[in-house]
Image: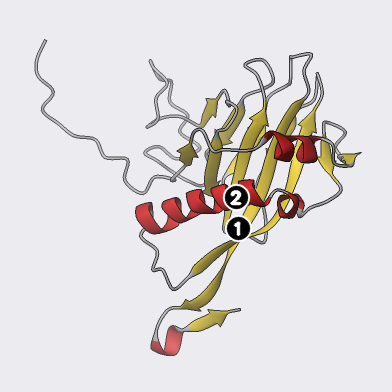
Amino acid sequence: MSEIDYTIMPLFSTPLFIKNDVFISDEEKRILKSAEYERMKAGNGYYTKDKYILNKAEGLKINIAKAISQFVYEELKVVPTIHFYITNSWVVKHEKGDWAQMHAHTNCLISGVYYFDVNKDSGRIYFHKEANHFSVFPMHMDLDITDHNILNAKAWNFIPENGQLFLFPSWLQHSVSENKSDQERHSLAFNVYIKGKIGTKEFQMEIK
């Protein structure tokens, strides 16, 4: 077998930040799970009526904020004068048979999902490539492939684990497969926006 003599770079890829073992206390779990829920309009799950639920779990909110800082300042290299903050947050509950359709989040820049009550059968999270986001071949050239990998994929999925946090651009479409477990599935969703001065000179603006 010949030695590989080339390099492939995932140039202009979509960053997905994954952090494991983000701590949540038992009391915070109890608060989030015992909150008041309402059925979603699509009829495929429940979410908390409180859309700022993280304000009741300050320890978890701090741990998530630390992960957001790692993502935007250490990896994306955003200047520290721009402040990223969580705007809203809610818990999603999926009973057996519930699922989440493909969707994106609006009025935010970064979105996240934190898992604190899941098992291997309670549903996978899928991230979907935008139809107009060409990697190599345009949408109307749907070539057959011999192997599914991160360079040619139209979707990528994960089996979430408890304590796992996903951060991604809010425009990135995602979905959740059916909960096939007898156990309820709980996850925390949230959005992130910015404050501060952006740009310089005639292109500068300030978001307060």
Percent position (x, y) of residue 159? 57, 23
Q: Examine the rendering and report whether any part of residue 131 can be seen.
A: no
- Where residue 92 sits, quadrant-wise, is top right
Element class at badge 2: strand
Give the quadrant of the N terminus. top left
- Residue at 45 percent across and 29 percent down: it is 153
Q: CA distance from mark 2 to mark 1?
A: 6 Å
Name the residue at the bottom extreme: 202
Q: Earlier in the sequence, mark 2 or mark 1?
A: 2
State left or right for residue 59 relative to residue 39: left
Percent position (x, y) of residue 143? 43, 26
Neighbour tally class for label 1: few under 14, some 14-19, many 20 plus, Cα within 10 Å: many
- Identify which amino acid the numbered label 1 is placed on: Val
Name the residue at the top extreme: 1
- Residue at 61 percent across and 30 percent down: it is 125
- Name the residue tied to disc 1: 192
Give the camera-side residue of 19 and 168.
19
Element class at badge 1: strand
How has the structure been colored for display?
Answer: secondary structure
Percent position (x, y) of residue 144? 43, 20
The answer to whether marks 2 and 1 mark residues whose Cβ atoms lie closer than 8 Å is: yes
- Identify which amino acid the numbered label 2 is placed on: Ser
State left or right for residue 195 relative to residue 91: left
Q: Is residue 203 above or below residue 70?
A: below
Q: Is residue 125 above or below residue 180?
A: below
Q: Examine the rendering and report whether any part of residue 64 can be seen.
A: yes
- Residue at 54 percent across and 38 percent down: it is 22
State left or right for residue 87 relative to residue 159: right
- Name the residue tied to disc 2: 111
Neighbour tally class for label 2: few under 14, some 14-19, many 20 plus, Cα within 10 Å: many
- Where residue 97 sits, quadrant-wise, is top right
